[in-house]
Amino acid sequence: EAGVTQSPTHLIKTRGQQATLRCSPISGHTSVYWYQQALGLGLQFLLWYDEGEERNRGNFPPRFSGRQFPNYSSELNVNALELEDSALYLCASSHPGQGISPLHFGNGTRLTVT
Amino acid sequence: GDSVTQMEGPVTLSEEAFLTINCTYTATGYPSLFWYVQYPGEGLQLLLKATKADDKGSNKGFEATYRKETTSFHLEKGSVQVSDSAVYFCALGRINKFYFGSGTKLNVKP
C-alpha cells in the first residue's frame, strides 16, 4: 500500500509570496492532518480535514488555510509568507474506522522563506 | 487538558547500551499511546502503540508499557544500534485528536 505522499519535497519562496503544499493520503483514509515542525522544535498542529470539511485548526493565523478534495487529497496554502514560516510541513492521514486510528505521516515539504 | 511530557535530549549512548526514554502523560479516560520515530530528513513513522492499561507495544526491539497508575509510557530497548539514531516522539491519541511530546533526540555512537 502506498504511503502518504507530499509534494513538493522542497519549496523556496520569498517573503510576501504564497505557498501551496499538497498531500495525498493513504488509500481509504478520509482524515488529513497538517503539522508544522520548525527546526529543532516539536510538532505544532495546524489543521484537520475530514470528509471534505475543516474540522479543527490550531493556533495559527488565518493566512494558513487549506482544503480537502473529494478524493481526500489535501492542499495547504500559506499566504503572505513570513521568514518564521520556514519549517517542515508534515501531512498525516488516518483511517476512519472504529476506535483511535494512528496517524500515518508523509515525509514532509521543507518550506524555506527568504 | 491532555498533554504529553518526555525527557529532554539529546541522549547519547554507545552501541549495545540499554535505552530508556521517559514519557508521562496527563489525560482523563482511556486514550491510546504511541511512539513515533523520525529519521533525518523524513517524516514520523509509527514505532509502536498501546490502546489500554497494561498493554505492551513492541516493534524492532523497542518496547513500551501503558502504565495507568504512573501515567507513563516509557520507551525501552535492550541494545541500541547506530541505526537507531533519530528523534523519538511520544504521543497521546483520542479520536481525531493527538498530542505529541517535544521529541527526544537519540545519538548512538559506534
Image (cartoon, rainbow, N blue to C red):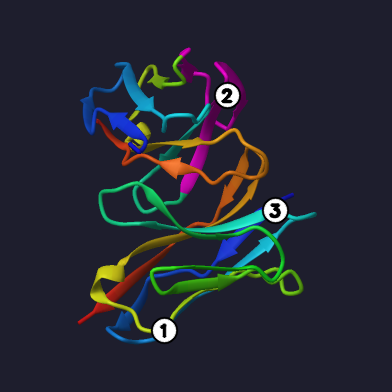
User: Identity of the amino acid at label 3?
Assistant: Pro
Estimate the x, y position of residue B24 in percent, counting from the top left. 63, 67
Q: Residues within 10 Å of mark 3 (few under 14, many from 20)?
A: many
Residue at horizontal 72 percent and vertical 74 percent from the top: B70
Can residue A114 be seen in the rendering of this structure? no
Residue at disc 3, secondary structure: loop
Whether the residues at callouts 1 and 2 have beta carbons within 8 Å, the answer is no
Estimate the x, y position of residue A109 in percent, counting from the top left. 30, 34
Residue at disc 2, secondary structure: strand
Residue at disc 1, secondary structure: loop
Q: Which residues are magenta?
A: A43-70
Do the dots labelled 1 and 2 sit on one chain? no
Quadrant the C terminus of chain A occupies: top left
Disc 3: which residue = B31
Foreground: A3 or A11? A3
Above or below, B94 relative to B6: above
Quadrant the N terminus of chain A occupies: top left
